[in-house]
Image (cartoon, rainbow, N blue to C red):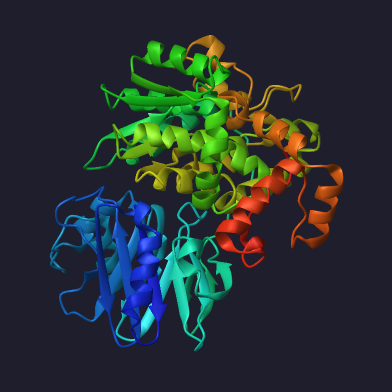
Amino acid sequence: MCGIAVITGRADEQMLRHMMESMRHRGPDDSGTFLGDEVSLGHVRLSIIDVQSGRQPIQSLCGNRCIVYNGEVYNFQELRQNLEGKYRFSSNTDTEVILHLYEELGREFIHHLDGMFAFAIYDAGELLLARDRLGIKPLYYGKLDQGELAFASEVKALKDCRDVREFPPGHFYTAADGFVPYYHLPRRNPLDRPVDEILRLLRENLTEAVRKRLVADVPVGVFLSGGLDSSIIAAVMKSHIPDLHSFSVGVQDSPDILASREVAAYLGTRHHEYIYEEEEMKEILPRVIYYLESFDMPLVRSAIPGYFVSRLARGFVKVILTGEGSDELFSGYHHLKKFDDPEELSRELYEITSRLHNTNLQRTDRMSMAHGIEARVPFLDAAFIDLVSTLPVDRIRAEDGQMEKWILRKAFESYLPEQIVWRRKQKFSEGAGSVDFLAAVADAQIADEELTAANAAAPVPLRSKEELIYYRVYADHFGEPSTADLVGRTLRY
């Protein structure tokens, strides 16, 4: 897990290093550059795989190909076995496997990668960039004054660019072809299976998704809110990591703090928690928004406990597994209960899953990387998504439509205490206790007329006084309104 920076055209080492420095939090362990006649590549490294020998950029032995890479490819060892004998390896990293697989297969190599990634490969005059299927790893691009392009893992690295845009998930890019899609999120295609078979397949596929994400040369832990999703992930991990570290945060006696203690005791994890005060939320808000690169109200609310729990975890582990994506796949949010028509519900689930790249996945990436740890999301494993896309939506939740994620609860009900399995859904900000405090602060500080005037001038609608506070902090960091249209909006909350 790292940060990458790319500039097309003649080398501009000073600009490249400024871009890299702005993302130093993403790669506190190492850095490197490649300065060519047609492209400059920069990398800041968080060492996860092959800690000693995996520094980037990595060049092919012939010297005319080079890669910078952010992410993890979980099947890299299998891919390497098929390449050994044809290519000489100088490291044990997944990064080098990607480069040689590209040399072996050309652009078709992208379909063989199982993981989360954003990378750039320079190949003797041609630059190819790609982003993973769902956009778990971030990537942005913008234009420079002479028509060159710059690419980077975070918006803050592109402050010298104009017309900054998000690199679309599931695409690769070349100058000749522009953006080319290689993946489309599967639409629901229900298959008629007995419930027992569905339950077995869910257990087997999610267990495999977790197992793949334990590959690391550094300690791996779990964010444990005590909700269904993180508790399932923790339970599966515990069978592979006997000395599993778990982490939870919240205000005193918040629902997540109490539930996570119960799950940790049941599973026997080495549990860590941090109790934060309301004033701490105000204090860290500017830092949260700076790293988050968003003013979206629901996202900022959940980023606050995300910031605290990432800060807590960094003292013990370098890789974290989380429960992100489950609510989108299994109809976990309260607003979804109003959808009685299976077709309408299917469309809504597709929509919110396809928007994860600049909502919850952005929050997960930015808050973890702000503290130099890598977050992995087993529920968004490509094979697991394919499986869930074959489940009829009327099997996902209880027949009355009121128990969200019913099928997932049934699949794992023997793994956890009954009261945890059937605990009602709470958003991260609700469970951790950060949902109401800043809203009350905003209501006390901002008059109705002030919100109306601000909305008249803002480039996007500001939905509350609370969001106006977040927007003003965002504008202080990133300018107004230069990048506001990059901010993903949570449409229903």
392 w.r.t. 486: above or below: above
Q: Is residue 187 visible?
A: no
Q: Looking at this view, is 368 or 53 the one in front?
A: 368
249 w.r.t. 27: above or below: above
299 w.r.t. 276: above or below: below
Q: Looking at this view, is 312 or 140 the one in front?
A: 312
Question: Relative to 332, is 75 on the left or the right?
Answer: left
Question: Relative to 240, is 471 on the left or the right?
Answer: right
Question: Relative to 154, is 36 on the left or the right?
Answer: left
Residue 11: x %, y % from top left? 33, 83
Q: Residue at x 40, y 26 (%)?
A: 247
Q: Quadrant of residue 388?
A: top right
Q: Looking at this view, is 352 or 82 the one in front?
A: 352
Residue 305: x %, y % from top left? 52, 33
Toward the front, the furthest residue is: 445
Residue 327: x %, y % from top left? 60, 35
Q: Looking at this view, is 81 or 243 the one in front?
A: 243
Q: Quadrant of the C terminus?
A: top right
Question: Relative to 375, is 345 on the left or the right?
Answer: right
Q: Residue at x 28, y 83 (%)?
A: 36
Q: Residue at x 83, y 59 (%)?
A: 456
240 w.r.t. 415: above or below: below
Q: Quadrant of residue 271?
A: top left
Residue 339: x %, y % from top left? 79, 36
Q: Is residue 189 visible?
A: yes
